[in-house]
Image (cartoon, helix red, strand yellow):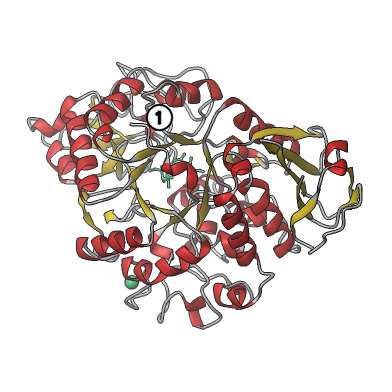
């Protein structure tokens, strides 16, 4: 117990389908990953989180698993996976797998067998009679469909699916299901992986009787199964019986979890989870999800950052992943692409915690707007479109989807200005953003001032900096609507991070102790190293002072 190496590393998330195509069929794969490991090493990366690589019908791009012990054939096989793990380890890069056990694909053999009422697999899932003919067992909503129940004619029963109808919820109350989970964990740990990112793990314990939710008009059900009755018990069981026997760590995806709950998951000397992905800072321009947009509100972002920084000793840090639109297009500015990209990088990479960088974030990939709903792949976008189009004209519906869809983060990585962004030698499975000719890895490699090299320098700095690793956190001028300013201090050393979230000039007076200290500019996105006591910011300027 007590493994802490995850605190000294910056992680990189790979969403395999769009990372790099190594065998020329237009789909990203492990051969491509193998070739890019040296690149990740050069970026200073110390760990990779793989979004699901497992065999899957890909209805939700791997978050619908049909075999937990097989690699999807389009991504490779266990041999190449093993080679990737070995080479990564030789480069001192840890490997984290996605553990998706809230649900399986409906094509998983457990579910196929469970369709038979007499099968021992029946109780692996939530099969229930309808309330009355034609009416599902309860009124819960699904994230990706309208209702959370699928109907099976043969047995005249319904099965629970909180996500897509092809993502069937597992009954974690069944000890046999928990044993399966433990066996899966063991299988991959024995293969050499170093940890797990646990998909919607806070939702795996459903309340007994699956009662109706009469409190809220939408997202009905969540409050009942989010941190449900046995959640801590089950996570402790996984920890004690399996994880404790390995030098590994677990990070839970935790939508809608409060600080108080987070402490219950991560507190004590035998925590359920080592870190969590919380969502609050992803809501500075929306309510709950990107499909309920609001104007960007920096104070909301700052409140979220500061609350989580102050109330927890440690946690995961991120601005992008495969579920959210690109951050420059949201909190930054496509006009001030490089400037805002660098500002956003510094703004979170110098916080306390373990940072995750999502593929393409390091070169500032941006959102894409495709001409028709038929061009999109994200099942959540398609559901929202189909609902909205019944009530509103396409001119209103499509732009909302274009802005909110998870597909924004899922376009192929732009490696060079060659055809298809250098992602593949053939037409990729999904649209490449047209801006690949200007935003790509190869050209940023050549430019010492590029966003990519800014990430490199920041990552190198934070990996060896005791202030970033151990320092205190304090926010300054919390009410300022355009500037996010914080300091980190440790053993007489300090960092002051000043970030502007606007293209308008703002003035900021450096605090006295900074002005009077032995001060220097460590990072600047305008190559400014002046030490004027009063700063008038340029668009999306960031300055990091050491004092
Ligand atoms: O995401 C869970 C989750 O909270 C999302 O459904 C979220 O509501 C949505 O993406 C809007 O931001 C995890 C995975 O990260 C996601 O890719 C999967 O689709 C989902 O679980 C189901 O496995
Ligand atoms: Ca391929």
Question: Is 173 positioned to the left or the right of 61 in the image?
Answer: left
| Residue 369, visible in the rendered structure | no
Residue 140 percent location from the top left of the image: 41, 27
**Nearer-the-camera pick, 482 or 74:** 482
Residue 213 percent location from the top left of the image: 44, 19
Residue 118 percent location from the top left of the image: 7, 30
Instruction: For the N terminus, give its image quadrant.
Output: top left
Mark 1 Cβ and ligand 1 under 8 Å apart? no
Residue 458, quarter of the rendered image: bottom right
**Nearer-the-camera pick, 265 or 487:** 487
- Image position of 73 with respect to 268: above or below: below
User: How many numbered discs, if any?
Assistant: 1
- Image position of 361 with respect to 230: above or below: below
Residue 434, quarter of the rendered image: bottom right
Residue 83, quarter of the rendered image: bottom left
Residue plotted at (59% across, 25% down): 311
Residue plotted at (81% across, 32% down): 479
**Nearer-the-camera pick, 140 or 342:** 342
Outermost residue toward the left in this view:
118
Q: Determine whether the residue tagged by mark 1 lies in a helix, strand or loop.
A: helix
| Residue 74, visible in the rendered structure | yes
Dot 1 crowding, Cα within 10 Å, few <14, some 14–19, many 20+:
many
**Nearer-the-camera pick, 389 or 360:** 360
Residue plotted at (37% across, 32% down): 2
Question: Is 395 positioned to the left or the right of 174 in the image?
Answer: right
Quarter containing ligand 2?
bottom left
- Image position of 284 with respect to 135: above or below: below
Instruction: For the C terminus, give its image quadrant.
Output: top right
Residue 510 percent location from the top left of the image: 87, 42
Task: List the residue tagged with mark 1.
Answer: 202
Residue plotted at (56% across, 65% down): 370
């Amino acid at each position: 117990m007590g493994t802490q190496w995850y605190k000294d590393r910056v992680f990189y998330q790979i969403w395999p389908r769009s990372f790099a195509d190594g065998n020329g069929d237009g789909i990203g794969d492990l051969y491509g990953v193998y070739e890019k490991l040296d690149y990740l090493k050069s970026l200073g990366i110390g760990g990779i989180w793989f979004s699901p690589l497992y065999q899957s019908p890909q209805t939700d791009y791997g978050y619908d698993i049909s075999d937990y012990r097989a690699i999807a054939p389009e991504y490779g096989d266990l041999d190449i996976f093993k080679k990737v793990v070995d080479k990564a380890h030789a480069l001192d890069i840890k490997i984290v797998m996605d553990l998706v056990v809230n649900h399986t694909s409906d094509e998983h053999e457990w579910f196929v067998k469970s369709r038979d009422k007499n099968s021992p697999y029946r109780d692996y899932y939530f099969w229930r009679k309808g309330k009355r003919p034609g009416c599902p067992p309860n009124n819960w909503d699904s994230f990706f469909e309208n209702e959370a129940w699928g109907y099976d004619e043969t047995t005249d029963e319904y099965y629970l699916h909180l996500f897509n109808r092809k993502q069937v919820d597992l009954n974690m109350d069944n000890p046999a299901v928990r044993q399966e989970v433990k066996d899966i964990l063991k299988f991959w740990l024995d293969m050499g992986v170093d940890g797990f990112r646990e998909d919607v793990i806070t939702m795996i314990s459903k309340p007994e009787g699956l009662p109706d939710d009469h409190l809220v008009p939408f997202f009905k059900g969540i409050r009942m199964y989010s941190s449900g009755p046995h959640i801590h018990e089950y996570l402790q069981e996984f920890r004690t019986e399996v994880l404790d026997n390995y030098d590994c760590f677990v990070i839970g995806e935790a939508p809608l979890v409060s600080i108080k709950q987070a402490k219950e998951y991560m507190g004590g000397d035998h925590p359920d989870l080592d870190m969590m992905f919380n969502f609050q800072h992803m809501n500075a321009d929306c309510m709950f999800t990107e499909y309920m947009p609001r104007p960007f509100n920096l104070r909301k972002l700052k409140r979220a950052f500061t609350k989580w920084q102050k109330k927890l000793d440690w946690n995961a840090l991120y601005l992008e992943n495969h579920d959210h639109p690109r951050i420059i297009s949201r909190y930054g500015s496509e006009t001030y692409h490089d400037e805002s990209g660098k500002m956003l990088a510094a703004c979170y990479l110098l916080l306390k915690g373990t940072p995750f960088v999502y593929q393409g974030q390091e070169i500032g990939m941006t959102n894409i707007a495709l001409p028709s709903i038929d061009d999109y792949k994200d099942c959540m976008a398609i559901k929202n479109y189909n609902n909205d189009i019944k009530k509103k004209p396409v001119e209103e519906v499509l732009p909302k989807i274009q802005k909110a869809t998870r597909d924004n983060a899922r376009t192929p990585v732009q490696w060079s200005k060659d055809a298809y962004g250098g992602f593949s030698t053939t037409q990729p499975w999904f649209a490449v953003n047209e801006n690949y000719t200007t935003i790509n890895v190869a050209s940023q490699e050549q430019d010492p001032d590029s966003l990519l090299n800014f990430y490199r320098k920041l990552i190198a700095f934070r990996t060896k900096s005791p202030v970033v690793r151990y320092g205190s956190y304090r926010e300054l001028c919390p009410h300022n609507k355009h500037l996010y300013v914080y300091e980190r201090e440790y053993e007489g050393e300090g960092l002051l991070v000043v970030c502007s979230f606007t293209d308008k000039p703002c003035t900021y007076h450096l605090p006295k102790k900074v002005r009077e200290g032995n001060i220097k500019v460590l990072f600047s996105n305008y190559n400014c190293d002046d030490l004027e006591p009063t700063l008038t910011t340029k668009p999306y300027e960031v300055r990091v002072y050491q004092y």
